[in-house]
Amino acid sequence: MSTEQNKALARQLVEEMLNQGNMSVIDELFAPDFVEHEELPPEIPPGREAPKLLFTMLRSAFPDFKATIEHLIAEGDKVVLHMTWTGTQKGEFMGIPPTGKSMSIGVIDIIRIAEGEGLRDPGRRPRRPARPHRLDVLRRPGLLPPDPLVAGLLALASGNSSRPAPPLQ
């Protein structure tokens, strides 16, 4: 497939799965041996069922959920999506009752499109995941307290602390 075809497939995935909630598109577009490399709750299997369950849960808690593509870059069989996810928590999310708070988070996803096989997750990661950690989704709308590592790094950067930052894991 050409890079333009790969981009079109990524746009279709965002529009149909994320924005419209059509989880059946996963069976159409994802390779049968797709593996989700995101950190998953223990009850969610890592295959094609993972995105179905995760995004069904997310859209249930955030019924106005919207993914906006900010940048879309393709080279060879890889597509990089830089998106903004927004929504208002109106349903229970990971055991947290509805808060009515809005979230807006930046997300970077890298997918590989295998010729004739659909989408694959390459599993390539920087030292810290580029995708939001599931707890980060809770912190951004103020559902959980801030990450102490991030708070410490921000304090150091602003000159408000002489303590060394904890090591990155």
Image (spheres, rainbow, N blue to C red):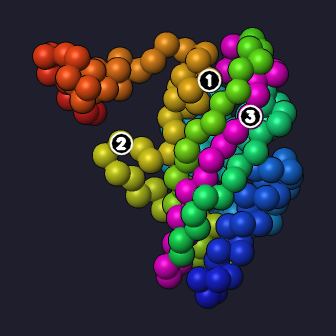
Q: Residues within 10 Å of mark 1 (few under 14, many from 20)?
A: some
| Residue at 31%, 26% in the rendered image | 154
Q: Amino acid at mark 2?
A: Arg
Q: Residues within 10 Å of mark 3 (few under 14, many from 20)?
A: many
Q: Is residue 153 above or below residue 32?
A: above
Q: Position of residue 51 (x, y in %)?
A: 69, 46
Nearer the observer: mark 2 or 1; the answer is: 1
Q: Position of residue 168 (x, y in %)?
A: 25, 33
Can the viewer see residue 104 in this picture? Answer: yes
Q: Position of residue 97 (x, y in %)?
A: 75, 12
Tag 2 residue: 128
Asked whether residue 114 is drawn in magenta, I would say no
| Residue at 23%, 17% in the rendered image | 160
Query: Which of pointers 2 and 1 lies earlier in the amino acid sequence?
Result: 2
**CB atoms of marks 3 and 2 within 8 Å:** no
Q: Position of residue 87 (x, y in %)?
A: 74, 34
Which numbered marker is on residue 141? 1
